[in-house]
Image: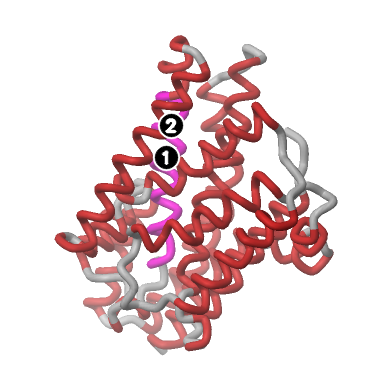
Amino acid sequence: MKYRAEIDGLRALAVVPVILFHAGFEVFSGGFVGVDVFFVISGYLITTILIEDMENDRFSIINFYERRARRILPALFFVMLVCLPFAWMWMLPDRMKDFSQSIVAVNLFASNILFWLESGYFGAASENKPLLHTWSLAVEEQYYVLFPIFLFVAWRFGKNRVFWMIIVFAAISLALSEWAWRNEPSANFYLAPTRAWELLAGSIAAFVAHKSGVKANNALSLLGLAAILFAIFAYDKNTPFPSVYALVPVVGVVLLVLFSGKETLTAKLLSTKLFVGIGLISYSAYLWHQPIFAFIRVY
């Protein structure tokens, strides 16, 4: 897979608003959409890798899972290990019990389910949960487990049919999220079925890019950047999410992925050392920010 510096720069555009949102900066009232940006990027990158492996007859589900585990788990386990003594020192028994349950849930790739059962994402109590942010990692991990299996099974029907299957699944997931925010808002926020369309949007972009290549279109790539920034500054905790409102940042990322050729202004901006540097440490920054903020509040 060809390296794209602007994708790393896009990661910076995802992680910084999330951190500032959790830090309490009101101007970044929609900073939580950075997670949705991550979802689309993950869907795009993973699907691109899988398509190339499938077409070159080198796909191995074991190797895929091994690569994902090496990428995600060491840093995640280290963060949890560092959290333990602070939880032991500063948490009262009831909070320590909740934290212990979250440790178990993270290891089972099910923390999104646990936090759905406990409370809403925007509640005051949630701010004191050191591992609250791992809900998004759980959604991604569930995608990593299921999507390669689907692709492997469906590939025999032809790449074009697989592409349309993904579009149908994404449409169903989006429709489900639109229903769920009205009826089951907490489940809608945390659970994979209502988040899957965001990851699948990245998968759709991967199929399009693989067939037609990445285009250089200043207007469309700038529109994508503007859509993401609009959501970051205009949305807040009262915005139904995910729902059709999430289409704004999600489509914005898709536009950036497909139309930010090297000659475009957006590619040049996102490929600067500052953006790429932040993007390269975005996973670590995302892992550490919530425990730090939560333990400060707990203390």
* Residue appearing at x 61%, y 67% in the figure: 226
What residue is pinned by disc 2? 147
Where is mark 1, residue-wise? 143
Residue 4 image position (x, y, % from top left): 76, 46
Q: How many marks overall?
A: 2
Residue occupying image coordinates x 38% and y 67%: 132
Q: Amino acid at mark 1?
A: Tyr
Tell me if residue 280 can be seen.
no
- Who is closer to the viewer here, 107 or 125? 125
Quadrant in the picture for the C terminus: bottom left
Q: Residues within 10 Å of mark 1 (few under 14, many from 20)?
A: many
**Could you tell me how far apart the alpha carbons at marks 2 and 1 are, in whole angstroms?**
6 Å
Q: Label 1 near label 2: C-beta < 8 Å? A: yes
Part of the protein shown in magenta: 132-150
Task: Give how far across and how far down residue 245 sits, in percent.
Answer: 38, 63
Location of the N terminus (image quadrant): top right
Q: Is residue 296 magenta?
A: no
Secondary-structure class at tag 1: helix
Question: Which residue occupies the foreground of this view, 222 or 20?
Answer: 222
Q: Is residue 240 above or below residue 2?
A: below
